Amino acid sequence: MLKEGSIVRAVEITQKNPKSWIFQLEREGEKSTHLGRIDHDKIIGKKYGNVVSLIKGHVLLLKPSPRDFLRSFRLKTQIMYEDDCALACSVAGIGNGMKVGEAGTGSGALTSFLAWNVAPDGHVYSFDINEKHLRNAEQNIQMTGLQNIITFQIHDIRESIQVPALDAFFLDFSTPFEAIDSITPSLIGGGHLICFVPNWGQVEQTVEKINENEALELQQVFEVNRRDFAINPKKHIMRPKFRSIVYSGILIHTIKILF
Ligand SMILES: C[S@@+](CC[C@H](N)C(=O)[O-])C[C@H]1O[C@@H](n2cnc3c(N)ncnc32)[C@H](O)[C@@H]1O
């Protein structure tokens, strides 16, 4: 049952390019759309999956996923897209109750995936050297309702950090190899370090640095490939889309070992 404080994604019901809006329900709250006003009080008491009529159309009420959140974020930086975020969380086994770190925060895309996965009992420590990026990410994260389990800090991650022992750390900026030595002491034994970089040269420098660090054991280096399909049953169309993002970056997965 949807109540005050629930987060809702209202999706326009239409054949072509449906628009959607994510918001947190408040008593007497409202959301303006091109279909007319969405009155929060009329949604409170309904369920995800219900359809609501507006003046010029209908919207479907859904529970937003991290993918929906990042597609609604204001982007000030390059981000890690959903496939990379999801697989990074999966290989590091991120789940409820874990404590994880990341740098840089960027626009908060990976942050939202991490918080979603460690919620409700875990915590995300998110660092960025650039205050404007950090404040924008903080603003973006408000729509997820997960802000209470994230600590944002302005910090150059090449310098050591003060955090509880972490289950995993994620590095997404141009020179992760410069932060490997500062991050490693914060990881628990068996903890995961994931670096995301777009260029081969960065992979080489990062792997070299990992190999020099006796407390780290390189696990795998890989990229995520995805092929979206165009589907139109009426025209019997089912084939890969002609245009799509063909490359985002490389994931480097490492584990902390204890002696
Ligand atoms: C590509 S963005 C990160 C995107 C983020 N993972 C996301 O999914 O939205 C890189 C970020 O790293 C930050 N950055 C660069 N050097 C840094 C450093 N030494 N310490 C902390 N953050 C840094 C930049 O300010 C930028 O916001």
Image (cartoon, rainbow, N blue to C red):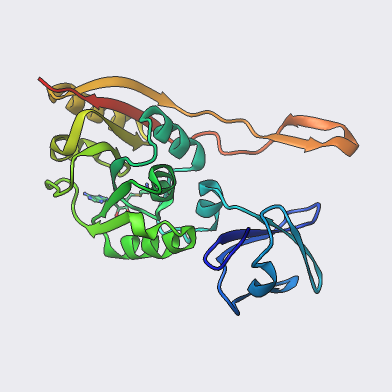
- Give the percent coordinates (x, y) of residue 173: 30, 44
Q: Is residue 32 visible?
A: no
Observer-nearest residue: 128 or 64?
64
Q: Residue at x 48, y 29 (%)?
A: 224
- Give the percent coordinates (x, y) of residue 239: 75, 29
Q: Is residue 10 above or below residue 28?
A: above
How many numbered discs sit on the rendered protein?
0
Question: Along the horizontal axis of the image, is 252 left or right of 27?
Answer: left
Q: Residue at x 75, y 70 (%)?
A: 35
Q: Residue at x 27, y 60 (%)?
A: 130
Which of the 4 image quarters holds residue 20? bottom right
Q: Is residue 158 above or below residue 152?
A: above
Observer-nearest residue: 22 or 233?
22
- Give the percent coordinates (x, y) of residue 181: 13, 35
Question: Along the horizontal axis of the image, is 230 left or right of 113?
Answer: right
- Give the percent coordinates (x, y) of residue 133: 34, 60
On-image quarter of the C terminus: top left
Observer-nearest residue: 241 or 119?
119
Q: Is residue 174 above or below residue 249?
A: below
On-image quarter of the N terminus: bottom right
